Image: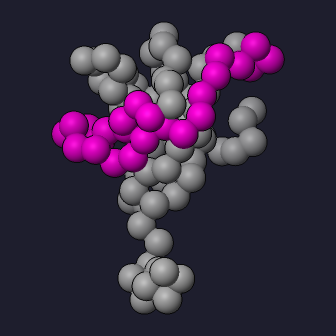
Amino acid sequence: TLEELKVEGINKKLVGLEMLEKSIPRHDYERKDGDGAKIGKVTSDTQSPSLNKAIAMGYVDADYSKIGTQVYIKVRDKLLTAKVVKIPFE
């Protein structure tokens, strides 16, 4: 509830992601930290033709929401590198 959020604080944030490896993250793919712990999931994704790169959005633990933070996307059985970027995408 909103009252619980006010007391406990917000622990998830919506962030933009830019893939640093060749892959397009898909809806519901897990986001991981450097140790492989789950920190969120992808909510939307695409290959941006105007930016010529794969981008995504999703929720992550607030500790991993800073611009430039490196995170990993679990694609099949691999962890591929991505970074948190400013929205709207540039």
Residue sitting farthest toward the left: 35
> Looking at the image, is 53 positioned above or below residue 69?
above
| In-image side of 61 versus 85 (left or right) | left
30 falls in the magenta region: yes
Can you see residue 21? yes
Residue appearing at x 50%, y 25% in the figure: 26
- How many numbered dots are placed on residues in this image? 0
Quarter of the figure with residue 7 = bottom left
Residue appearing at x 53%, y 82% in the figure: 2
Residue 78 screen position, x and y as percent: 28, 18
User: In which quadrant of the rendered image does the C terminus lie?
Assistant: top right
What colouring style does the render use? one colour
> Looking at the image, is 76 positioned above or below residue 1?
above
Looking at this view, is 51 or 75 the one in front? Answer: 75
> Looking at the image, is 5 positioned above or below residue 76?
below
3 falls in the magenta region: no
> Looking at the image, is 63 positioned above or below residue 48?
below
| In-image side of 27 versus 86 (left or right) | left
Can you see residue 68? no
Residue appearing at x 59%, y 34% in the figure: 44
Residue appearing at x 22%, y 44% in the figure: 37
The residues colored magenta run 28-51
Residue 9 screen position, x and y as percent: 44, 79
Residue sitting farthest toward the top: 22
Residue 48 screen position, x and y as percent: 71, 19
| In-image side of 10 versus 30 (left or right) | right
Residue 77 screen position, x and y as percent: 25, 18
Residue sitting farthest toward the right: 50
